[in-house]
Structures are given as structure tokens and as C-alpha cells.
Amino acid sequence: MSILSEIGRACGVPPLVRVGGVERRLARPLRLVLLALLADPGHEWRAHEVAHVTGLALGRVYAPLALLEDVGWLARREPLADAPWKGARCYRFAGPDGVEQAGRLLVVPSVSEGTGR
């Protein structure tokens, strides 16, 4: 872990994580969405369900869902024609690799790990 990451964490700055080969801040909306999805990895989630479970506004869950879909960890299914929720896409993990990769993001080593302290 770099000294900048340690300083950032000590100051309350979300840690940098690698998502799909790009470093990003593990900001609160992404953390909450990941926690919700990982709580029931086999469930097909709709954005309004994720918003309800996380306590985030509906508009705040779309970016994390899109990011996770873009990197291939989530698969999106368009709703069936006779679905009660018209226009509500369903999101689920794209196999065990998606669950594993998402779970790794939430495991952030402590400051003392890797420094021998």
C-alpha cells in the first residue's frame, strides 16, 4: 500500500481501488451498492430495490450499477414484456468471478498490514 493511500485513509478519503483496470475511489455509493448486491448474490436486483436497501436516492445507484456492468461484474437483463415493473432492468452478478471481484473491493487492508507494524 502506498503512503498516499495510507494518508488518504487516515484523513477519511475513500481508498483507491482498481475496477476494470482503472483506479477509482471506493466512494460511499459504490460501497453501499456492493454491500447490497453481495448480501444476496443470486438475486436479480432492480435499481429501485438497491436504492431502498442502501438508503441512497434512486439516481445515486445508477452510476455504480453501470460501472459494475461496464467492467463485466454485473449482467443486465431487460424486463420481460409482461413484467409488472415496466422498464425496470434486472441486474445480477455475472457468475462467480463477478461476486469474487466485487468482494475483493470491500476488503481493504489496514494501515499496519504490509508495513510490518
Image (cartoon, rainbow, N blue to C red):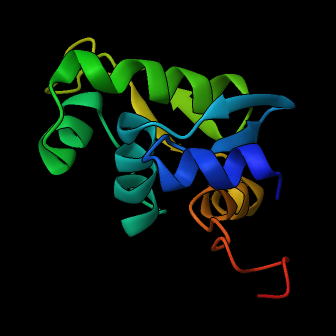
Q: Residue furthest bottom?
A: 117
Q: Residue at x 34, y 48 (%)?
A: 32
Which residue is nearer to you in this view: 41 or 54? 54
Task: Mark yes or no: residue 30 visible.
Answer: yes
Q: Quadrant of residue 108?
A: bottom right
The answer to whether one can see residue 40 in this image is: no
Tell whether 46 sits left or right of 76. Answer: left
Q: Is residue 65 left or right of residue 94?
A: left
Q: Position of residue 66 (x, y in %)?
A: 53, 21
Of the 4 image quadrants, the one containing the C terminus is bottom right
Q: Residue at x 67, y 40 (%)?
A: 16
Nearer to the camera, 10 or 94? 10
Please determine whether, in this image, residue 79 is positioned above or below residue 68.
Answer: above
Q: Is residue 14 above or below residue 10?
A: above
Q: Number of labelled discs?
A: 0
Please state the horizontal and vertical placement of residue 116, each as a whole percent of the image.
Answer: 85, 87
Query: Which residue is at a point 78% across and 51% down the rendered structure image?
Result: 3
Question: In the image, what residue occupies the spot 54% across and 52% down?
Answer: 9
Q: Is residue 33 left or right of residue 104?
A: left
Quadrant housing residue 47: top left
**The one of 74 and 14 positioned closer to us in this rendering:** 14
Q: Nearer the viewer, residue 1 or 101?
A: 1
Q: Is residue 55 above or below residue 117?
A: above
Quadrant of the frame with the N terminus: bottom right
